[in-house]
Image (spheres, helix red, strand yellow):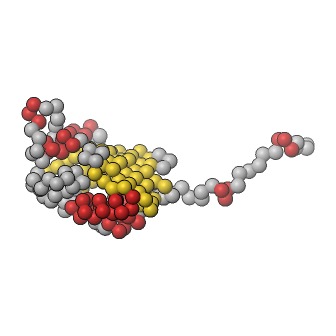
Amino acid sequence: MKIDDSQKVEMPNTQSFPREVPDLGALCDAHIAREFADLDVDATMETMVPEPYVYCVAVMTGGFGCEGVRRFYSQHFINQIPKDAKVTRISRTVGKDQVVDEFILSFTHDTQWDYLLPGIPPTGKRVELPHVLVMKFEDGKVAHEHLWWDQASLLVQVGLLDPGSLPVVGIEQARRLLRVAE
């Protein structure tokens, strides 16, 4: 049987496809470990593209570009992380170039932490705050982070907002999320 040239199928050139797809979940975990476990600004920056950005939506803090992100990490985030800070993941969704994590950030507000409460001195209060993180990757490095949380719940938890006549809740928000997510 003769094969007509019009029926020939060429195999794709496998050298044009990436040989290894990065494990975005592992890259996300490594970045977070540099922040929270190692408390190392330089190591954290090494996990990122040359001109990343970090944007904390609730309070419009963060940094843009290498120097802006480095300044945010070194002056307002990593150097101020409370010693008992803990991240408890609720869920993770991994796409082709980004990771979305839902987690609870728990800590005692015993140090000023501009990441969440810019300019607010320590209150000594216990905080359990649900977060959503959207982390985008380019070539195996973090390109940006968008962080979301309920600022009203945080303000209730540190005693700066009275929930009495407002439709807001405090620490119950995180505790219920943990229960329903089990």
Residue at image coords 86%, 44% = 5
* Left or right, residue 110 beside residue 71: left
Q: Nearer the viewer, residue 154 or 71?
A: 71
Query: Is residue 36 at all visible to an observer of this figure?
Result: no
> Could you say where residue 87 lies in the image, as x and y percent from the top left?
27, 53
Residue 167, quarter of picture: top left
Query: Is residue 45 at all visible to an observer of this figure?
Result: yes
> Could you say where residue 166 lies in the image, as x and y percent from the top left?
13, 32
Residue at image coords 31%, 54% = 62
Residue 50, quarter of picture: bottom left
> Could you say where residue 158 lies in the image, as x and y percent from the top left?
12, 48
Residue at image coords 32%, 66% = 41
* Left or right, residue 142 beside residue 6: left
Q: Which of 147 and 86 is in front in this view?
A: 147
User: Residue pushed farthest right?
Assistant: 2
Q: Looking at the figure, which quarter contains the N terminus?
A: top right
Q: Looking at the figure, which quarter contains the C terminus?
A: top left
Residue at image coords 35%, 68% = 42
